Amino acid sequence: MTQHISRLAHSAARRHFVLGACASAAALAFTAVGFGFPSFIAQALAAESNPPPAGLEGFLLLSQKLTGRASFDRVLAQRVYDALSKADSQFVANVAQLNTWLASHGGVPSDTVTQALQADTPALAVTVGAIMRAWYLGLVGDAPRVSVVAYERALMFDPVADVLTIPSYCRDVPFYWTQKPPGAATS
């Protein structure tokens, strides 16, 4: 009987060990891929202990998060950063705030950043829009003071780069594409 109780105790201890090991492995797996409560705490603590870089480096970090691109041409990035800084006196401070905000929100998907910021801090949402406009359209500022900071390297051309030649000049008179081609049937 003593041997039977000893075997049951050993079996229970082994079961507790296996369950603990599985729970630890699951927690580690969820933390490693960015799921669950432990990773959110780790990201928040990392954001507090490691402030995001400032200046151009901070802008590049933010641009990578917003666009999903791994890298940018540094000359173009400097041009975009300088133009945005000149157009908005709060731009540099807003970039730092946006990097901090993104770090503390556990990697909010970039397509929801503007929507999430609209309610709390509309000025930061405007900055996100200005950054995306600069990278994708190559434009900074509002009419009548719009600066073209990129054209052929604007990100709007990337999705169609394999099939579309970037037009480098106007092929006809202004608004030529609104006229029916010669020989087209009139209605």
Image (cartoon, helix red, strand yellow):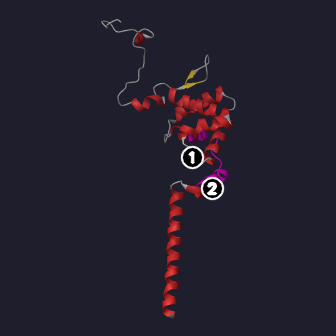
Residue 40 drawn in magenta: yes
Residue closest to the eye, 83 or 24? 24
The range drawn in magenta is: 39-61
Which residue, given by chain and number where applicable, does mark 2 sit on? 41
Tag 1–tag 2 contact (CB < 8 Å): no
Quick one: which residue is furthest to the front in this view? 1
Q: Secondary structure at mark 2?
A: helix
Q: Amino acid at mark 2?
A: Ile
* Residue denoted by label 1: 107
Q: Position of residue 56 (x, y in %)?
A: 60, 38
Q: Amino acid at mark 1?
A: Gly
79 or 25, nearer to the observer:
25
Q: Which residue is rendered at x = 55% and y = 34% of the image?
A: 77
- Residue at 50%, 79% in the rendered image: 14
Query: Can residue 25 be seen?
Result: yes
Which picture quadrant has residue 97? Answer: top right
